[in-house]
Amino acid sequence: MKHFLSIADATTDELKHMLEVGRCLRDERDAGKANAPVLAGQTLAMIFEKPSLRTRVSFEQAMIELGGHSIVLGQEVGLGKREAVSDVAKVLGGMVHAVAARVFEHQKLVDFAEHGGVPVINMLSDESHPCQALADIMTLQDEFGADLAGRSVAFVGDGNNVARSVAILCGKLGVRFVLASPQAYSFESAAVKQIRADVPGIALDLIDDPAQAVKGADAVFTDTFTSMGQESEKQARLEAFKGYQVNDQLLSHAADHAIVLHCLPAYRGVEITDEVMDGPRSRVFPEAHNRLHAQKGLLAVLMGGA
Ligand code: CP
Ligand code: NVA
């Protein structure tokens, strides 16, 4: 694995290894021990075209805890506007050891990876959010054990970047993935084709009935109905997603042991209720904290050769 632009860039063994390394580093930290400085002398540059709380803080903190440095850049870089993406990549590639970027168009990451000469990490694009999926799966492992084969995930809501990455990772680990969304917001046929090509044999169901989706699920995921950059579609989306809120009524169809995940930020009272977010099934804050631990696994492997 040279880059981490999509879950499909890593083999199943590499994904399991990154998660295992992340959990070991977390165990050390929980025991009050410092992690070995495996990234000493290395710098990660981060570029954000969109806002972030969890991704920015977890990457910066991960670099600190692994003995490295990070540089955070925002809109001022003007990726593809002030300067060609390939030129930014060539400049940064000669100064830092890896680059992570949060972009609107996924193609910018592909161009970056082609020209930078250093590992590139996707911190969210219009297509995918693979770092989020790693943390989500780590949260499932915390609940159900490291081997998740045979488990089942229901994603209720938008067939968006997060849903696509979680679907691919689930497929690679033998976890069934059911997306319940209005038909117009399900995975597009090109995305389904890509997912099936990335993970032949994936157990993937696309339906429109949230109650049917949560039946038999070990975990129920949701995310905002309106992602960053889709603000002009907000009203139409709120209309289309009526009936897709993750609330106690919907969860009455789920197994007693089913947990609830949300990548955050959450719009409380829209896609998820306060009762669920703050209730006994919720694992949303451990999930957010796992962004740190899962990314430490990723960085230790990609930059530190763990
Ligand atoms: N879940 C997530 O990526 O959060 P941020 O947008 O705050 O980074
Ligand atoms: N789907 C959301 C995820 C935010 C972390 C978005 O792209 O805005």
Image (cartoon, rainbow, N blue to C red):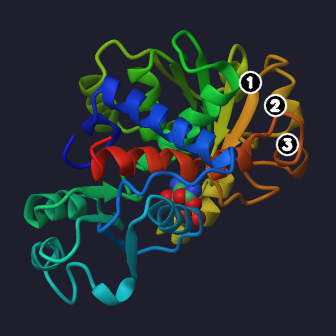
- At mark 1, the secondary structure is helix
Identify the mark nearer the N-term, 2 or 3: 2
Residue 182 seen in the figure: no
Q: Is residue 48 left or right of residue 29?
A: left
Quadrant of the snapshot with the N terminus: top left
Residue at 16%, 58% in the rendered image: 113
Which of label 1 and label 3 is nearer to you?
3
Tag 3 residue: 276
Tell me which numbered mark, 1 or 3, is placed earlier along the sequence.
Answer: 1
Residue 22 drawn at (x, y percent): 50, 41
Task: Count residues near mark 3 (Cα–Cα under 10 Å), then give few for <14, some for 14-19, many for 20+.
Answer: many
Q: Is residue 47 visible?
A: yes
For the image, the number of numbered tags is: 3
Tell me the kind of residue under disc 2: Leu
Quarter of the displayed picture in which ligand 1 can be seen:
bottom right
Q: Position of residue 200 (x, y in %)?
A: 28, 16
Above or below, 125 relative to 9? below
x, y percent for residue 126: 38, 57
| Labelled pair 2, 3 in contact (Cβ < 8 Å) | no
Q: Are marks 2 and 1 in contact (CB under 8 Å)?
A: yes
| Distance in Å between CA atoms under marks 1 and 3 | 16 Å
Q: Which mark is residue 250?
A: 2
Q: Quadrant of residue 27?
A: top right
Judge left or right: residue 42 versus residue 160: left
State the separation of the CA atoms marked 2 and 3.
Answer: 10 Å
Q: Which amino acid type is shown beneath numbered disc 1?
A: Ala
Q: Nearer the viewer, residue 9 or 235?
A: 9
**Looking at the image, which is closer to me, 23 or 208?**
23
Look at label 3 and name its amino acid.
Val
Where, by quadrant of the figure, is residue 270 drawn? Answer: bottom right
- Mark drawn on residue 211: 1
